[in-house]
Amino acid sequence: MLLAAPLVDAQRQSAGNANQTGARPRSRSGQAQPAPAPAPITDEQASYLFGLTFGEQLHGIGIDNQISVDAVTRGVKEALQGKKRRPPRSSKSRNTCGRRCRPRRAHKTAATEFLAKNGAKKGVQTTASGLQYKVTKPGDAKAPRSLRPMK
C-alpha cells in the first residue's frame, strides 16, 4: 500500500492535465466530469519509482550510507527469482541474542527466586512438576459423581 501511492501520483503527473487549477471540467448539466484514466507507466518508470520510494523510506528511518546498493539489488533479484532467506551461519548469532535476552533472563531469575521463597512458606505444597499450591480451607464434602445432582 505504501508503494502504490507514488506510482499513482506519477501516473497523474504523466497524464498531463491541461487544467492547472485542479478543477474538473463540467458537463452541460453542471456536474463534474470524471477524471480521465491515468496513462500507464512503463516498467522502467515503475521500477524507478519503487526504488525511489524504498530509498525515501530508508532515509526516513535514518539509514543513509550504511547499506550496499549492489547487495540490495542482488537481494531483490534473488527474491524475485524465488530464493528464500536463510539464517546467518555465525555461531555467535545462534547462541546469543544480545539485548533481547536480558529482560528474559531477569524475569527468569526473579521467577526462580520467588518460587524458592514461596515454596519454603508454611502450608505451600510443591508437586513434581513444580506447581505450588496452598490449601487455605480444607474441604469436608463428598466429591461429586456424574450421576449425583449438585445442590
Image (tube, rainbow, N blue to C red):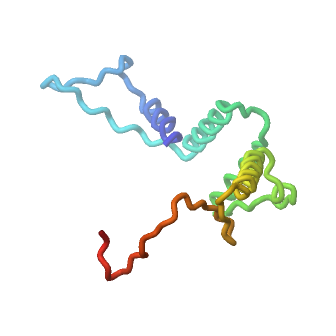
Relative to 38, is 24 on the left or the right?
A: left
The image shows residue 83 at horizontal and vertical percentages of: 68, 63
Identity of the residue drawn at 74% across and 48% down: 110
Any part of residue 116 in sight: yes
Report the front residue among 60 and 141.
141
Relative to 70, is 31 on the left or the right?
A: left
The image shows residue 31 at horizontal and vertical percentages of: 18, 26
Report the front residue among 113 and 142.
142
Identity of the residue drawn at 26% across and 24% down: 25
Q: Quadrant of residue 63?
A: top right
Is 124 above or below relative to 144? above
The image shows residue 131 at horizontal and vertical percentages of: 64, 64
Is 84 above or below relative to 59? below
Q: How many marks?
A: 0
Report the front residue among 88 and 64.
88
Identity of the residue drawn at 74% across and 52% down: 117
Is 59 above or below relative to 151? above
User: Residue reaching furthest right?
Assistant: 91
User: Residue reaching furthest top?
Assistant: 21
Any part of residue 70 in sight: no
User: Residue reaching furthest left?
Assistant: 29
